[in-house]
Amino acid sequence: MAADNAIIIGLIASNFTPKHRKKIIMYGVLAAFIFRVIFALSATYLFEFAIIKIIGGALLVWIVHDLQQDLFGKKRKIKSPTKISKEPSFMESMYKVILADITLSFDNVIGVVAASRDNYGLMIFGLLLSVVLIVTIATYFADYIQKHKWIGYVGLIVILIVAIQLIIGGLVDYDVLQINETFKKYF
């Protein structure tokens, strides 16, 4: 479940030089850990609100659209008449990482809390393991996307699928949609 966080942090970080890439990954992982702890402490309460899922899914759709423009579509702003900027704004990218961490950490925590079944030691181990995986995978994705831009589209599709799952899950909770029992585990 940590892969979705790692993919989006890697996608965002891939637009930066290695120095800034490491900072974005470090701050993104730190934010993911903090949100995981917060959500772990309040997971059962927050999960009762379907609107949280819908808002999280909508935020992810916005992030996917924005990342798609950053990675593949938008022309870079010119900082000087002779030099084209190769990096998007560091602060804007950090906001994207934090929004993605908030949204994606919630589903990760729900999975870890459910799997630990009130065993707090196991829950803490699962949360720490997910953060370690995010660091490892995000660094790999950032470097790999820098060399192979097509993998960025695959990452965007994965994040879009997670967003759709969150939105559909929230709509099912509101009884706006009905899903066959076989497929409910995916939402």
Image: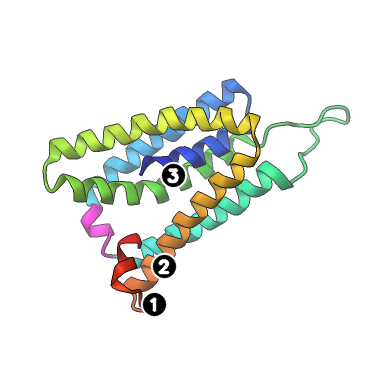
**Element under label 1?**
loop
Residue 126 coordinates in the image, percent (x, y): 24, 37
Mark closest to the chain's N terminus, 3 or 1: 3
- Give the magenta-colored segment's residue range: 43-48
Q: Residue at x 56, y 33 (%)?
A: 13
Q: Against 114, is 55 above or below?
A: below
Which kind of residue does numbered mark 3 sit on? Asp
Residue type at mark 1 is: Leu
**Residue 106 horizontal side relative to residue 63, left or right:** left
Q: Is 155 a magenta residue?
A: no
| First of labels 2, 3 by sequence position | 3
Could you tell me what secondary structure mostly forms the magenta stretch?
Answer: helix
Distance from Cα at disc 3 to Cα at disc 1? 25 Å
Secondary structure type for disc 3: helix
Q: Amino acid at mark 2?
A: Ile
Q: Residue at x 20, y 51 (%)?
A: 114
Q: Which residue is mark 3?
A: 4
- Provide residue 118's location: percent of width, then percent of height: 11, 47
